[in-house]
Image (cartoon, rainbow, N blue to C red):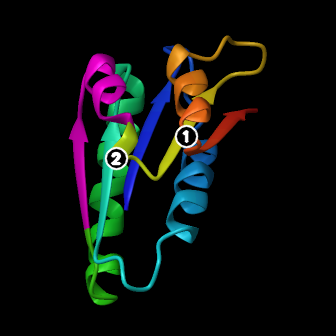
Amino acid sequence: MIVGVQGTPNFNNYNIFLRAMAVALSELKENDREFHLYSMGPSNINSMAMEFTNLSERGLKARGKVIKYKPVPTWWMEQNIDSFDHFAFVSNPREKTSNLVSLAKSKNINTNIYNF
């Protein structure tokens, strides 16, 4: 499974980020052996994604699954959007979403926006 995550520079609620990742993990099929998490930033979101990956690694490994994290630029996701299974966007209330949200929705990728 390939998951993308992006957020706003002011977002700092790790609990909401964890909720977004829990929803993505809930879509992981039993036959999926890898969970790839690509983060488009900014740096606060990259840090949360890296921490989530490090904390989840042992639990997923016990279930026979591997989690991998990679920060990527926005243009990379735009070029590779067709390979994604899930996209999560995290922000504070009333902050604008990115263009990737619209692009992911237009490609029928399961897209969730978390803005609490």
Quadrant of res 64 = bottom left
Q: Quadrant of the N terminus?
A: bottom left
User: Which residue position holds label 2?
Assistant: 83
Range of magenta residues: 67-81
Q: Nearer the viewer, residue 71 or 54?
A: 71
Q: Residues within 10 Å of mark 1 (few under 14, many from 20)?
A: many
Image location (x, y in percent) of residue 86: 50, 49
Image location (x, y in percent) of residue 49: 37, 43
Image location (x, y in percent) of residue 44: 40, 25
User: Which residue position holds label 1?
Assistant: 88
Q: Nearer the viewer, residue 88 or 99?
A: 99
Q: Secondary structure at mark 2?
A: helix
Quadrant of res 42 = top left
Q: Residue at x 41, y 49 (%)?
A: 3
Give amino acid for label 1. Answer: Ala
Q: CA distance from mark 2 to mark 1?
A: 15 Å
Quadrant of res 40 = top left
Position of residue 11 in the picture relative to residue 43 (left or right): right
Image location (x, y in percent) of residue 14: 54, 42
Q: Secondary structure at mark 1?
A: strand
Q: Determine if the magenta segment contains residue 18.
A: no
Q: Residue at x 38, y 35 (%)?
A: 81
Q: Quadrant of the C terminus?
A: top right
Q: Residue at x 57, y 61 (%)?
A: 22
Q: Residues within 10 Å of mark 2 (few under 14, many from 20)?
A: few
Position of residue 74 in the picture relative to residue 92 (left or right): left
Q: How many tags in the picture?
A: 2
Picture layout, residue 71 above or below residue 10: below
